[in-house]
Amino acid sequence: MTDAFRPEARAPRGFIDKRAADLRAERRIVESVSAVYERYGFERLDTGAFEYADALGKFLPDADRPNEGVFALQDDDEQWMALRYDLTAPLARFAAQHWETLPKPFRRYAVGTVWRNEKPGPGRFREFVQCDADTVGSARPEADAEIIAMAVEGFAAAGLPQNDYVLKINSRKLLNGLLTSAGAVDPGQRLAVLRAVDKLDRLGVEGVRLLLGAGRRDESGAFTRGAELAGPAIEAVIAFVEAGGGARSATLDRLAGVIGGSAEGDEGLEELGRIGAALTSLGVAEDRAVFDPSVVRGLEYYTGAVFEAELLAEILDEKGQKVRFGSVGGGGRYDDLVARFTGQPVPATGFSFGVSRLAAALRASGLDHAAEARGPVVVIAFDAASMGEYFAAAAELRAAGLPAEVYLGASGMKAQMKYADRRLSPAAVILGGDEIASGQVTIKDLDLGRELAAKVADNRQWREDRPGQLTVARSELVAAVRRIVEAPR
């Protein structure tokens, strides 16, 4: 007789299991950021997880099975559907579908899971949560500035220290003006230039210079063909990417000296100038949102201003190796997305928080205090005959707004106390026969016990002193537990 097949218990790569602390951390970020969006007057919108594949458009190749970059399946009507890869493409479809009845501009925010069929990496998953805000129907640069200001407030609300990130701003119009000035007319050459610029933070100026010219050979010996620009054009691009830094107005002055005279470039400079003025009025500090011409984002997606929030904090993994999370949010202006459906241009701009990546970064950097939140109060169960007493105590605590549970395993008191400790419970409620008979209840302050256990070297003395344990009248249960739960830690 052959052994029954036993599959290996494993999660697919790029998909992670999240316990309460992980979910609590993500929920705290979502609630904090959503509160910022609502203060700015954005309404929440939820769309379905699936969209028709032809409505997504961004990743889909010309193939019989559109499953590159997305997870797709064919419906029984032979139409391809795909799990959404972001929250913006569904918004564009919704706006096109309901445009006549929507208030214009349409200001919405959304929270949801998205899926990408891509190679996973540190902080980069195939399934993750985003939290977006978008304005559809306004071409004003001030709409971009408002989105940026909300992003800055959102990061602060989520608990990211000011010095641990920077929000970088650029414009596709500046990039297009640069490419025109550099003589890069061929689409393939333009793409090669943009990809070279996008590698500035990884390869440095000299690496980018090589990629703008004939090409670059990496440490493994692999050769990457360059954009093959002429020498003066290469130096113009280098001057462009090095023009960032310092005050926003100073950056614009330097950029004007590099690309001034290009019609599209001048238009981009004027728009960034208005964004900078609005950011100043909105109280966004110069070091929180900077103009950085090296930002290249969404090469085929964005049409104007682009934004990217980069994590600056140095984060080490469990082996002490540096982990680079990079971008924890981004967005920009995408005036052509709704037009895919309607044929009519509809201006739009937005920003997306990478909630899962931001939560992972906060956890890795030790800033995720939500992960330390306590579990429920545990009511110890001694015998089946008294289960009614245990459940009554737990119900009383819950009715008072205090999370509580009755231990429903089959272990003794020592194991139950260990269970409560692993749950990070603030307190354990003990209703033994003596307590029930005398109308009393014993409460063990587990928070205090953990603190004292960490400080007391003599375990015998600690056991004898029984720190943090008190016996009160049964009628005082809620008040006594509340004092423990609400005590400063």
Image (cartoon, grey):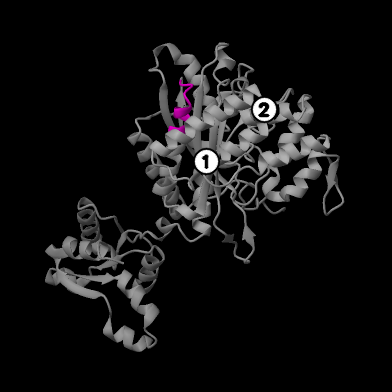
Where is residue 68? Give x, y as percent: 70, 32
The residue wearing badge 2 is 177
> As displayed, is residue 204 above or below residue 348?
below
Amino acid identity at mark 1 = Arg
Which residue is at the front of the view, 73 or 44? Answer: 44
Left or right of 264: which side holds 216?
right
Characterize the local packing of mark 1: few (<14), some (14-19) or many (20 or more) Cα atoms within 10 angstroms: many
Q: Is residue 129 visible?
A: no
Please, what is the three-letter code of the amino acid marked with disc 2?
Gly
Which quadrant of the rendered structure holds the C terminus? bottom left
In the rendered image of this protein, does residue 481 appear above or below residue 207? below
Does 355 sit above or below residue 392? above
- Per the picture, the main secondary structure of the magenta-coloured stretch is helix
Look at the image and give the residue range highlighted in magenta: 138-146
Going from N to C along the chain, the mark reached first, 1 or 2, is 2
Q: Position of residue 198 (x, y in %)?
A: 68, 41
Q: Nearer the viewer, residue 278 or 221?
A: 278
Name the element at disc 2.
helix
Distance between the alpha carbons at the discs numbered 1 and 2: 19 Å
How far from the left and from the top, in percent, is residue 115?
Answer: 58, 36
Secondary structure beneath disc 1?
helix
Q: Give left or right: position of 445 versus 327.
A: left
**In the picture, residue 474 is in which quadrant?**
bottom left
Q: Is residue 422 above or below residue 264?
A: below
Front residue of 250 and 421: 250
Q: Can residue 180 be spotted in the picture?
A: yes
Q: State the image quarter where residue 476 is shown.
A: bottom left
Residue 306, percent from left and from top: 57, 34
Front one among 173 and 413: 173
Q: Which mark is residue 248?
A: 1
Name the residue located 37 percent from the left edge and 79 percent from the top edge: 453
Marking on residue 173: none
